[in-house]
Amino acid sequence: MSQENGDQMEKEAYQKVASRIEPKRPMLMNCVKAFFVGGFICVIGQCISTFYMHFFHFNEATVGAPTVATLIFISVLLTGFGVYDKFSQFSGAGTAVPVTGFANSMASTAIEYKTEGFVLGVGGNMFKLAGSVIVFGTVAAFIIGIIYTIATGQWGAM
Amino acid sequence: MIFLWAFIVGGLICVVGQLMMDGLKLTPAHTMATLVVVGAVLDGLGLYERLIDFAGAGATVPITSFGNQLVHGALAEADRTGLIGVITGIFQITSAGISAAIIFSFLAALVFKPKG
């Protein structure tokens, strides 16, 4: 038997053992938690939105940006005090999917890599986890923008 | 009423994320990247704006709104200046979120000490 074949078999055997030993994920319970925590964060967001619309002359279309910025501020603060990570252990996607999770991933890596210095550590690692969101969002937006331009035929000053 | 819909819609989007992590066994990074692309595509189809009208922060707070904002900025600028607007406009609306995240995270790194 060749070496490669042996490796393949070992891998399969490992997969079998791993899938047997791996604890069953309580999927339903996780979803319930994610629903309530995620919904709760969105309600806080809605409170902030309503506040801005009442007191600062934003409308439904423009209120998203200041709301998100405020939530990010709160999330970074909670991350700094180590509270957010405790929440996220409990609620999984409920804290990861809202923008607060995006801010949490940036703030926690920024704080964690502080020991490696501000340029290489904080500056270089801040987008370690959040980067994929920005990269894929931007590329997707670019492709959609190109399709839109082709569809409307507005090429502009070319 | 908008509060209730914000709760339900925002919660459901998080459940979708949880199902992707538990059911499809994706890493959190894969889940977030996928959700952002989904948000971008939905806005490209003109559907995300309706969801925001309907659910308010339930649609603007989850990470899908990030994709929506990227596309929204790109298309709004493309209407004004054509193809080059796709590039110049992408970060126009998202600026608040990304700038806030970078600035506050940097300040947090200045202030807080790493644990452990």
Image (spheres, rainbow, N blue to C red):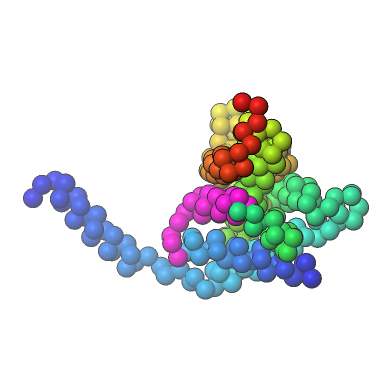
Check residue B36 for magenta coloring. yes
Looking at the rendering, the stretch of residues picked out in magenta corresponds to B23-44
Name the residue located 60 percent from the left edge and 62 percent from the top edge.
B14
Residue at the extreme front: A153
In-front residue for pair B10/A9: B10
Whole-percent x, y for residue B27 in the image: 47, 54
In-front residue for pair A62/A14: A62
Quarter of the rendering containing residue A90: bottom right
In the rendered image, the quadrant that contains the C terminus of chain A is top right
Name the residue located 55 percent from the left edge and 50 percent from the top edge.
B37
Residue at the extreme right: A55
Whole-percent x, y for residue A82 in the image: 65, 51
Name the residue located 68 percent from the left edge and 61 percent from the top edge.
B51
Whole-percent x, y for residue A71 in the image: 73, 51
Name the residue located 73 percent from the left edge and 50 percent from the top edge.
A68
Residue A106 showing in the rendered view: no
Residue A139 showing in the rendered view: yes
Residue A77 in the image: above or below residue B83 = below
Quarter of the rendering containing residue B115: top right
Whole-percent x, y for residue A65 in the image: 75, 47
Residue at the extreme bottom: A28
Quarter of the rendering containing residue B114: top right
Question: Does residue A8 appear to the left or right of A37 in the view shown?
Answer: left
Residue A57 in the image: above or below residue A34 = above
Check residue A40 for magenta coloring. no
Magenta segment main secondary structure: helix
Q: How many marks?
A: 0
Question: Does residue B97 appear to the left or right of A128 in the view shown?
Answer: right
